[in-house]
Image (cartoon, helix red, strand yellow):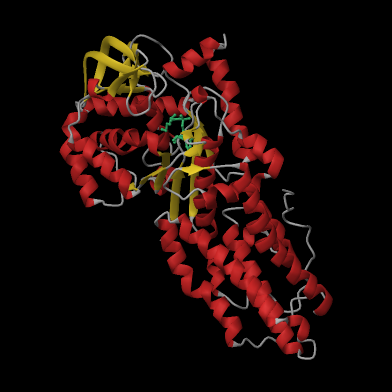
Amino acid sequence: MDKNFFITTPIYYPSAKPHMGHAYSSIIADFFARFKKIDGFKVCFLTGTDEHGLKIQRAAEKKGMETQKFCDELSKTFRDLSQTLNLSNTDFIRTTEDRHKKSVQNLWNELQKNNEIYLSKYSGWYSVSDEAFYSDSEIEEINGKKVSKISKSAVEWVDEESFFFRLSKWEKQLLKYYEENPDFIKPISRKNEVVSFVKSGLKDLSVSRKSFSWGIPVPKNKDHVIYVWLDALTNYISALNYPNINDDKYKRFWPATIHLIGKDILRFHAIYWPAFLLAAKIPLPKRIYGHGWILSGEEKMSKSKGNILDPIEIIQEYGLDPLRYYLIKEVSFGNDGNISKEKLEDCINSDLANNFGNLCQRVTAFAMKNCDGKIPDNIKFLEDDLKILDKFKSNINQIRKKIDDQDINFYIDFIVNTLFETNKYFNDQEPWNKKSDTSRLNTIVYTTLEIVRKICYMLYPIIPQSSINALKIFGINENEIEFSSLENHLYLRENSKIKKIDILFKKVEK
Ligand code: MSP
């Protein structure tokens, strides 16, 4: 059977330059995509920009720019960021593309055909910043201004003709679905929030706007544009060539394995999106994972709060892989995480430069001098060697399972602990005192090099470029990295040449 894996990031609003929160969603998605790739899966990894709606229209107006031109410019900064972050995305979708417009209008027609949409009038609150409708009970007043209790963003009163989606009709079925598919929404705390929200009663959802025009027109009613969330969510199937459901890509990758999103947009993904799909008789994605926020100080980063940490600046100062490593390791996945330069520097010095970089340098320098610059031969493993090598073999399926459970903490702890144990192993075995026993010296060096190889494979999804750089020791290329080879203790070919490599991570002076 083909092993397929489809992961998506949220599509980002190009209303301002990308910030660390966006980089975070993308880097985590890249981690999973790369892992699955080296584990033999066909991977579709989708990201992109969400370009319609009042928020974007107003941002363009503020800059005095034509909206499409504004989107072209800002969308490009997100596309460039994908490269800067070394993402392995296989597609980048823009909601202003024709393939997407066609897909959204088709979904609309399906919903209309199934009698899921009707024309009425919306009178209520709307937040342009969240592009969300809020009920009276979700609104509070702060400093004389009405805001959403949840996001604290300003709301305005809307009174206009609108098409409605029969969301209320799907309440019971959604609850049944959550119950029968306990892993549909993760982490569990977020699932509970969604369930209690749905249990409190769903109202029909306004799915078109009439008072502005920056959006996809409602088929056969050009006075309305389609609500930006119905438009945006559909990107996940547009990229697979929906409505052509016989298309290879669609057949292979839908339903998505995982929609990775921030917790603030859970309602849209875990309630509206499945309801639209149920109503259009399209299978539901397998998992929605709502990660936490990257906090700056104690607050979520946002343009309006002016507390944005710029990923590009951090990368220029410290390099990309340290940032990737830091975000993946130090932000406990699923929870909010506070990031600081100081903690990033600690991470570089202790984990990357000391534990990993130093081990690579030490063992290669030793092998250069004492093993003729080759992978040693005449290997006879003893218990101490096998103990550490077997760790990989005996955990390989456990690691796979943890990845499927999005347990990144397990994965990274495994690496950090193993690095620590390997450094200790090399010290304790004292190969420099074994010069009279070549077989033992060779076996210690071989074992350490094998572990370095295995760790580089495991680090590849986290710090791809540094892993590739380190694998040059063995002349192993990126496309040769296979996770399943972690089971093999004798992967490195005896007598093949090893190469000295440049310093992987420079320590930061503090
Ligand atoms: N356009 C919508 C998503 C549509 S998906 C069909 C959107 N865009 S966004 O640009 O505002 O946010 C995109 C993602 O970035 C969201 O998942 C959001 O949670 C995430 N982040 C924005 N700020 C963040 C932090 N400070 N920390 C972590 N992620 C945050 O919403």
124 or 215: nearer the viewer: 124
> Hey, which quadrant is residue 190 in on the image?
top left
Residue 421 in the image: x percent, y percent?
59, 72
| Residue depicted at 21% across the width and 51% down the height | 180
State which quarter of the image contains the N terminus: bottom left
Residue 198 in the image: x percent, y percent?
21, 36
Residue 266 higher or lower than 138, as above or below: below
Number of residue marks: 0
Residue 72 in the image: x percent, y percent?
57, 22
> Hey, which quadrant is residue 342 in on the image?
top right
Residue 403 higher or lower than 53, as above or below: below
Residue 493 higher or lower than 453, as above or below: below
| Residue depicted at 25% across the width and 37% down the height | 278
| Residue depicted at 24% across the width and 13% down the height | 123
Residue 119 higher or lower than 341, as above or below: above
Residue 242 in view in this figure: no
Left or right: residue 275 compared with residue 333: left
Residue 172 in view in this figure: yes
78 or 106: nearer the viewer: 78
Left or right: residue 455 compared with residue 240: right
Left or right: residue 492 compared with residue 394: right
Residue 486 in the image: x percent, y percent?
56, 70
333 or 168: nearer the viewer: 333
